Image (cartoon, grey):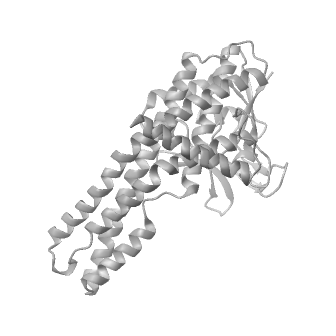
Amino acid sequence: MAGELCEVFREGAEAAEAILRDVYRVDVTKALDPLDRTDFLTIVQRLSSALRGVTRSAEADALRRAIRELDVDWPHLSGEAHGEVIRASRQALESLATQVLPQVNQVFEVEADRVVRASKKATVRRFELSIGTDLSRTDERIARFVRESQGNFVRDEYGRRREAFSKRAREIVASGIEGGVGRDDISEALSTSLAEQGLTRSRAYWDMVSMVFANRARTTTELAAFEEAGIEQYRFEAVLDEVTSEVCRFMHGRVFTVAKAMDRFRKGERARDPELIRETQPFIQVGADEDGNEVLFYERGDRRRTVARVDEAGFGERDAVGSYSDGLSNKQLEAAGVSAPPLHGQCRSTIVAEV
């Protein structure tokens, strides 16, 4: 099994490399540097391709099995029988996680070690740190935390999709029975609607998973190297191009303390539970306040907390940030756990040593 999985991962990576080489003219023969912007995106695309490779077929098969379970004579079944059929369909979906997650976790394990090792070497070289490039125990813990936390995120997402699938199936059946339609019409509605809702995640989903995974591994390894080298502060550095988020534009250039960022990592490491990790390291989102003003905010528990108001957006501009007011101070951002990348699902921002 392990050999087959490694082969799947290799084939997925090779497919991604072929696209990057032939379409985007990226040199994939050299060792990839996670601190290099182009190399980082190559790492993300390779990982995303590998994850799609180990999940796509299983997801499609599970969806077909689940829909097949729902092809029954609904109008002539009792309410209790309706529930039994929905549960049987759900069972077909539950087997998906059992089948797929070990493969996803194996891909994460391979790539976590690769990204952390490369990030440690690149950080020591780029910032001329007087430390070794071999992995420390902290680096090994970072690799474990990144792969486990992202694996738990994927697992929970499968659970959310199962719930949404079952809920939608119940709604379609109830609506069909109430409307007096026949078996064929209900089955067609189930097949059409649930196939559209689907289980298979889009490329954008796996790109997001891969981006968060790679950036968290890269940034936390940098922080650990800074801590080991005695560097006390780092600067948040956004990629200021046309698609840079308002979140990263607001954060660009801010200086934070290494010790507090590493304390936040250790707190997340102890949390284990995905929900607690999200509480410890929330993402910043873009939305509107009660008056319709565009704001940056994060959520903790049931509360929404404003980070800043966007007075003039910078999105769409190159080498520019926007204009913001009522923003949290750097100390307040640190206290909230929103001082280091990634701060959203497509975050490409990085950090640099402040010396």
Q: Quadrant of residue 351?
A: top right
Give the residue displayed 55% in from the left and 32% down from the top.
Answer: 112
- Seen as rendered, the residue at the extreme right is 319
Residue 305 seen in this snapshot? no
Between 279 and 162, the one nearer to me in the picture: 162
Give the residue displayed 73% in from the left and 55% down from the top.
Answer: 23
Give the residue displayed 46% in from the left and 36% down from the top.
Answer: 106
Tell me the quarter of the image containing the N terminus: top left
Between 119 and 337, the one nearer to me in the picture: 119
Q: Position of residue 263 (x, y in %)?
A: 57, 24
Q: Position of residue 197 (x, y in %)?
A: 44, 66
Q: Position of residue 109 (x, y in %)?
A: 50, 33
User: Vertically, is 174 above or below 284?
Assistant: below
Number of marks: 0
- Residue 5 located left or right of residue 185: right
User: Vertically, is 82 above or below 284?
Assistant: below
Give the residue displayed 72% in from the left and 25% down from the top.
Answer: 123
Residue 30 seen in this snapshot? yes
- Residue 333 located left or right of residue 69: right
